[in-house]
Image (cartoon, grey):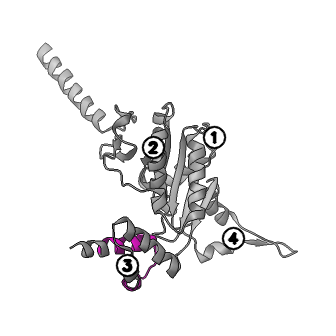
């Protein structure tokens, strides 16, 4: 009887161990915060969330980003205020693809990492875990930018409400050492449809007021204190960016001038005159010139 009872206890303990292994676990802080200046949040298949250090952070200097001086001044100023312990805003960077939105954030990280700035990248699907991430870093001496790239939501996605709450509206006070920086091609982060316009109301004197549907769709983006818009580049701006990247790859000035026509053909084939396209052309051209 005792042996049967003992086996039952052992099987119960094994079952409990298996159940605990798949239950969501509280996010624990990394043991070595000096392992990197950037971290990536990942949720395992078991439901466990972890912060993984990014050992090879893509280098980007503020001086390398051309033709976005106004946007660069706003983001760099806000980031500097944050690092210095002054009031600063959560930031939404919106606009044309490939115009330097995420590159500008990486450049600010490189510039202010020596002063304690760190970055945690969080995918849209994992934004529901934002409160746990903020809780883990709240008492750290570093300043953390929680970064979500290419952010947009479909109707009813859980990450939408989690982000909305953490930005402004949660019962918990905002954390002084955490800001949210997000990039998006959509200014309002949610898809907009023709039928949404039906919710507008009109007053007798001709004023137009958005209905509840529209108000809900703009409510998230309004919670970002700083909006920074990026626009498609003109031909001259595109060529200036090409010249900057070619110069950074060691291409001679005469060769840079000779590459203008090829750069325009490259952009025409890609259907875009963006900073990303300029960088890709410069890599291709510099590689061919070096062979």
- Disc 1 and disc 2: Cα gap in Å? 17 Å
Q: Is residue 282 rendered magenta in the image?
A: yes
Residue found 49% across the figure and 51% down from its top: 108
Sooner in the amino-acid sequence: mark 3 or mark 4 = 4
Determine the residue located farthest toward the top in the rendered image.
Answer: 2
For this view, does 38 lie left or right of residue 88?
Answer: left
Kindly tell me whether residue 239 is visible in this rendering: yes
- Disc 2 and disc 3: Cα gap in Å? 36 Å
Sooner in the amino-acid sequence: mark 1 or mark 4 = 1
Q: Which residue is mark 1?
A: 86
The N terminus: image quadrant: top left
Q: State the extent of the magenta-drawn residues as a range.
A: 261-284
Contact flag, marks 1 and 4 (Cβ < 8 Å): no
Residue found 64% across the figure and 65% down from its top: 213
Sooner in the amino-acid sequence: mark 2 or mark 4 = 2
Q: Label 3's element?
A: helix
Q: Which residue is mark 4?
A: 199
Q: Which residue is mark 3?
A: 254
Q: Within 10 angstroms of label 1, few (less than 14), some, or many (20 or more) residues? A: few
The C terminus: image quadrant: bottom left
In front: 162, or 176? Answer: 176
Which label sits in the foreground, 2 or 3?
A: 3
In front: 88, or 194? Answer: 88
Residue found 57% across the figure and 71% down from its top: 192
Contact flag, marks 1 and 2 (Cβ < 8 Å): no
């Amino acid at each position: 009887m005792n042996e049967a009872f003992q086996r039952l206890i052992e099987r119960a303990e094994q079952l409990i161990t298996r159940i605990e292994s798949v239950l969501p676990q509280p996010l624990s802080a990394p043991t070595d915060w000096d392992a990197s200046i950037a971290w990536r949040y990942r949720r395992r298949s078991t439901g466990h969330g972890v912060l993984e250090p990014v050992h090879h952070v893509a280098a980007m200097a503020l001086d390398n980003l051309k033709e976005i001086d106004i946007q660069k001044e706003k983001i760099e100023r806000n980031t500097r205020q944050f690092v210095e312990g002054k009031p600063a805003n959560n930031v939404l960077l919106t606009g044309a693809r490939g115009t330097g939105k995420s590159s500008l954030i990486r450049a600010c990280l490189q510039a202010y990492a020596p002063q304690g700035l760190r970055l945690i990248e969080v995918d849209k699907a994992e934004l529901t875990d934002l409160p746990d991430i903020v809780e883990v870093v709240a008492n750290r001496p570093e300043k953390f930018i929680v970064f979500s790239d290419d952010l947009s939501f479909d109707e009813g996605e859980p990450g939408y409400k989690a982000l909305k709450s953490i930005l402004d509206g949660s019962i918990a006070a905002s954390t002084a050492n955490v800001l949210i920086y997000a990039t998006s091609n959509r200014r309002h982060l949610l898809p907009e449809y023709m039928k949404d316009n039906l919710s507008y109301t009109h007053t007798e004197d001709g004023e137009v007021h958005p209905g509840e549907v529209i108000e809900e769709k703009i409510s998230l983006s309004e919670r970002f204190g700083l909006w920074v818009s990026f626009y498609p580049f003109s031909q001259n701006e595109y060529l200036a960016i090409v010249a900057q990247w070619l110069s950074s790859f060691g291409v001679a000035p005469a060769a840079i001038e000779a590459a203008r026509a090829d750069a325009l053909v490259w952009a025409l084939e890609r259907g875009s005159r963006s900073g990303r396209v300029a960088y890709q052309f410069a890599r291709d051209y510099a590689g061919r010139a070096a062979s």
